Image: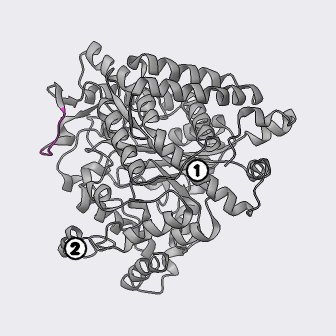
Amino acid sequence: MTNLLPESFSNLNAEDKKSLLTFNRGIEREALRVTPGGKLADTPHPETFGSKLTHPLVTTDFSEAQLELITPVFPSAEGALQKLDEVHRYVYSGVGDEILWSASMPCMLDEDASIPLAFFGDSNLGRLKTTYRSGLGHRYGRGMQTICAVHYNFSLSDEFWSWLKDAEGVSENLKDFTTRRYFDLMRNFRRYSWMLTYLFGASPAVCKSFVKDKAHTLEDFDEGTLYLPYATSLRSGNLGYQSDTQADQMNICYNTLDNYVSSLASAICAPHDAYEAINAWGEYPQVNANLLQSEAEFYSSIRAKRVPSAGENFLGSLLEHGVQYIEVRLLDVNPYLPLGIDESEIRFLDTFLLYCLMTPSPEHDQQSCDDVRTNSMAVVHNGRSPDLTLIDQGTERPMQAWAAEILDEISPWAELLGSELSDPGFIESFNLQVERVRDPAKTPSGQILGDLKSEGVPFFRFAMNQALAHRESFNSRPLDEQTVARYAEIAADSVAGQNDIEAKEQISFDEYLAGINASYQPLV
């Protein structure tokens, strides 16, 4: 690729520059429903929200008590956040006295069996979703699945890709060019993802009820809290969304689309002895006994995505039609923020992703992949340590010095976005990240531990206090009657959609499941 700099945009007129630099984004925020006492709710998904199988804005993730709030695609951060705020206000109108938990690491949990799986109805698709969640529970424990996150979906316009293709002077078709360059972006993202974990990690501590009898290396903070002194995101560490099986036996390749799809399909089709035993644990305990039940089980900081047609195999669709957008998956829910994310974070994410796209991105070899994991885990557990070193292409480097160097390279892109979009928020957010690198106490993880100490409260009470404050903020701004009526119509349409799916069922679940698993074989 050509190393295009911000100056590459200089020969465009102001309107074209603004158009090219207007990105598409959507947000998915997960949140546990908890009782006023701070325990995981045991109530079903509220009927007022309609069908979780087909509702476009409100569904569930792993557990019946784990909401997932989704925005459509917006060309502005403000639009996405305004919609997410509206969905939160709608949800609060339907959950009674329950509260949306404010943090990634969960509330007080009882034994695993008490955590209810999400139920999606009796259609084959609904049963597939519940069976998949059953498999996750058996493989990793249900407690781990209650950890919540913010997922950020990002894409650039066709107009941008056409301009970039011309600027780089390449002859391949636009679909292949776009896909190839998205993979360039993702490789750089993975290489530098440790920096986002440092800047936005917000889970340095956890309630002891989450750990229970699990082996761990955490330290006592107080009688109800475990932590690590320099941790940034325990959610992303070995107590959270990490899989030793995946790390040891899989190597998903981000060098090309073909490699990515074939390596994922191979994992979905590869039997795993440790998971074979699960098949004896009742009827349909998992989708299959392979390394992955589906591509959704692949735990990664970033994924290639597109929206497949109904009934179409996702990986097959991706291979045929190319990458449509990317999904950033390493973001903690920030307990200080009512939505778990804000404009400042989005501004820097956009800048960072543009930098990753426009910076040379060498293909990964095994050493590169190993370094990604080593650096990630180092920052997860010790990111705020002044002595932390990371591995940069075989060389040890002080983390703070490397982060400062990357920020120097990102700076012109922040200035470009700020000036061409007439939005000082890009520069303000960039400057905040510079301060966080200079002073680890200003990171969300540093602030959380500082507040736990100064307020003399355990993690549970801190997160509960934040959740109560957020609930008050949402409830103080009820939706108007017209918006309430619109959401009621969406809920009714979702129920009708689920009924329609169930009415069209023609094959047994055994046949359906066999067909789902067989659809990956041609992709290996």
Task: Tell me the quarter of the picture where residue 201 sits.
Answer: top left
Please tell me whether residue 511 is drawn above or below residue 325 in the rendered image: below
Residue 278 in view: yes
Count residues near mark 2 (Cα–Cα under 10 Å), then give few for <14, some for 14-19, many for 20+. few
Q: Is residue 22 left or right of residue 240?
A: right
Magenta range is 213-218
The alpha-carbon separation of the residues under discs 2 and 1 comes to 37 Å
Q: Does the magenta segment cover residue 296?
A: no
Decide which of tag 2 and tag 1 comes sooner along the chain: 1
Residue 187 coordinates in the image, percent (x, y): 52, 49
| Residue 182 picture location, percent across and down | 60, 52
- From the image, tell me which residue sits under label 2: 276
Kindly identify the amino acid type of the residue bearing the numbered disc 1: Asp
Query: How far across and how far down the image is residue 148, in percent?
Result: 38, 44
Give coordinates of residue 330: x percent, y percent.
43, 43
Give the residue displayed 85% in from the left and 33% down from the top.
14
Residue situated in front as seen by the camera: 105 or 123: 105
Q: Against 449, is 504 above or below?
A: below
Residue identifier under label 1: 184
**In the image, is residue 133 above or below residue 148?**
below
